[in-house]
Image: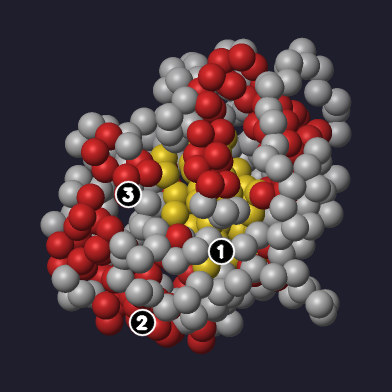
Amino acid sequence: MVAAGATLLVLIGLAIAFTTTSDDDEPAAAPTVSASPSASAFSLGPAVTAFPSPSPSPSLSPPSSPVDPRSARRMLALSRPNGTWPGAHGLSGVNGDPSLDTPSVKAFCTARGRPCTVAQTYTDRSSWSAMTAGTGWTFENFADFDGVLVISQGLVPDGDQADLAACAAGDHDADFKAFGTLMRTHNRADSIIRLGWEFNEQTSSWRADDTTTWLSCYHRAADSIRATNPSVLFDWTINAHDTPDGVCGGLSTNCYPGDDYVDIVGIDNYDHYPWSPTAASFDRTAAAPEGLTWLYNFARKHNKPFSVGEWGVVPTADVGKENPNFITWMHTWLAAHAQHLAYETYFSDCGSGGVQSSLYRTDPTCTRNPASARRYASLFGA
């Protein structure tokens, strides 16, 4: 959902409406889900020699000392048993809405009844400088957030798809090096970047129309960020349900950069196109190419942890209303795959033309999703 996530959110009023009333909606049937075989801890896969040699990825080994809640690597190394989510160590949170800052994240998580352990944010992509060296506010706004930070970073500025070739040629290596330096100087070196996320979405400014060019740009950007910030973790994220024929040859995994360039495999998974009216339909969509379970299985084949960086109800799309059962089915799926789940962040949006997925905002312009809000609090709250 590039259109929903890419717009820089402006500060507007926030009112939280949280009720302790029990969810009186009809319970949803649980989808059929199965977890992968046990593994002791996340680890990075073998080198892929078909690609240029990058800086080495940091390992995700179990911590032996008290864990810094801001350290992505150390938090990911904690045990998360299948069957519950978020549990004691699951990284669960939200994007900043209406503002990309700590207060907006904390307001959402207070309303759901459980603190957030991860926050997702975006850079200002109005220009190369704004997207890289000039995006210090991205970290300053979360300076007081005591959890893992996930930054969605584009490969080119908004509207500049033609710059992918220049990026692939190395013309913007300095820009990405500046961004790595920015992470380090703001004490957020050990964070997650969703680099070039949703590259298979039709409206993306870095849409992968030319697979070779896109991969070259991704490699240059990743190498440059790691050159100045070797602690960074990269999350390769697709948009669920559809990859157009002209993008990555019609299959998102054709644009997989290689195991040395990816630390986490992720998906943005909304209840739309198609929406899920039943648990069986949820299962079918998840198992189909470009689906939730389909990509999870790809991640396991590459020995990578999995993420769901954006997800939510979409009352403005083909369902035409909120669907609280989608919340239930997502929670069931997340719990069943907790062992290899890096993190998940609900996407809250009230923007004009957006997905209107907000659960707790009460602004007059927001579509209300009260049943979904109650269901979410009952499953993701304390």
The residue sitting at 20% across, 36% down in the picture is 246
- Mark 3: which amino acid? Cys
Vertical comparison of 365 with 24: above or below: below
Q: Nearer the viewer, residue 88 or 169?
A: 169
Of tags 1 and 2, the one toward the viewer is: 1
User: Can you tell which mark lies on residue 255?
Assistant: 3
Left or right: residue 114 versus residue 222 is right
How many labels, in total? Answer: 3
* Residue neighbourhood size for the residue with mark 3, other residues' Cα within 10 Å, grouped as few (<14), some (14–19), many (≥20): many
* Residue neighbourhood size for the residue with mark 1, other residues' Cα within 10 Å, grouped as few (<14), some (14–19), many (≥20): some
The residue sitting at 81% across, 23% down in the picture is 23
Residue under label 1 = 44
**Viewport quadrant of the C terminus:** top right
User: Label 1 to label 2, Cα distance in Å?
Assistant: 26 Å
* Picture quadrant of residue 201: top left
Q: Nearer the viewer, residue 155 or 24?
A: 155
The residue sitting at 51% across, 83% down in the picture is 184
Residue under label 2 = 178
